[in-house]
Amino acid sequence: MYPDNRPIGVFDSGVGGISVLAELLRLMPNENYIYYGDSHNAPYGVRPCDEVKELTIATANKLLSMGCKCLVIACNTATSAAVRPLRAAHPDIPVIGIEPALKPAVLNKGNGYVLVLATAVTLAEDKFKRLMAQYDHQARIHTLACPGIVEFVEKGITEGPELTSYLTDLFKDYLDTPPDCVVLGCTHYPFVGECIKTIFGSNTQIFDGGEGTARETRHQLTINDICNDSTAQGSVQIFNSDADYIRIAEKLLKIRQGR
Ligand code: DGL
């Protein structure tokens, strides 16, 4: 191993992927990171898949031109749309994509009732359909597209009466018999995870894919022998296609790290 101090590129449609960056920092604080949010074009989850693919590839190319040694697509929607072409175009570097944490939710309780929350694009794409097919005989799985949550988080709103009433209405069909597990299948949703948990009640467990993605990233760095073995704290640089959102991303990172 040698000290490969090139940055890890982490990106999302906006500020949501900060929830994944926080997990990466927890696991590998000595690595250097560049985070890029495309808030100018968010939300991705309501756009045609081809458009999401184009935007995702453009951001990936930006990060590669900044010298990143690997890419973490911290966006379920962008992963569904573009992880395959990105891997095909860059076979020499690890490209890690997040996916909804359906497996841990299903394994958590035999024959449980699992509700997956994600964007319309994530739920419609083949990648998620294949994941569902792997687990739908082991649990009762429902899916719900959640327009609107991304907009709250992009504004930096993670709590409060307006958000609570929006979410309560969004989940109204699921509150009489709350699910055993809720999967947060969009990287913006962990920022409103506390609010979601309060609405469903304490018997519902919440799962998100951030920690698993961080572990997979460490695994890929290790097998490709591109870890930074320095013991010093690494750096974090945050960029956004709309500079106004950098302040919100920084605030969200602090919230996540203060947990
Ligand atoms: N954060 C993104 C995800 O994980 C998508 C949000 C959006 O619709 O832009 O799916």
Image (spheres, grey):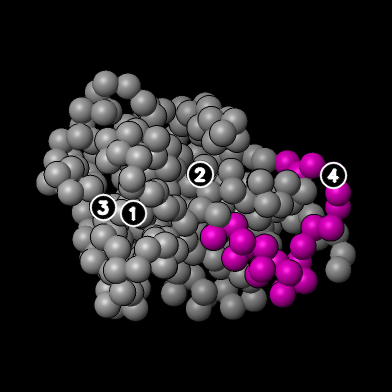
Q: Secondary structure at mark 1?
A: strand
> Which quarter of the figure has residue 43?
top left
Q: Amino acid at mark 4?
A: Ala
Q: Place residue 167 in its image quadrant.
A: top left
Tell whether 27 sits left or right of 229. Answer: left
C-alpha span from label 2 to label 1? 19 Å
Which mark, by number, is residue 181?
1
Q: Residue at x 44, y 74 (%)?
A: 84
Mark sitting on residue 19: 2
Instruction: Please tell me which residue lies in front, 150 or 193.
Output: 193
Give the percent coordinates (x, y) of residue 248: 48, 28
Give the percent coordinates (x, y) of residue 194. 39, 35
- The answer to which of marks 4 and 1 sits earlier in the sequence is 1
Q: Which residues are magenta?
A: 212-235
Q: Which residue is mark 3?
A: 179
Image quadrant where one finds the N terminus = bottom right
Q: Earlier in the sequence, mark 2 or mark 3?
A: 2
Kindly state the secondary structure of the residue where label 4 is placed: loop
Q: CA distance from mark 3 to mark 4?
A: 43 Å
Q: Is residue 218 magenta?
A: yes
Q: Nearer the viewer, mark 3 or mark 4?
A: 3
**C-alpha distance separating marks 3 and 1:** 5 Å
Of discs 2 and 1, which sits in the foreground? 1
The amino acid at mark 2 is Ser
Is ligand 1 less than 8 Å from the beta carbon at label 2? no
Which labelled disc corresponds to residue 232? 4
Determine the CA span between mark 4 and mark 2.
22 Å
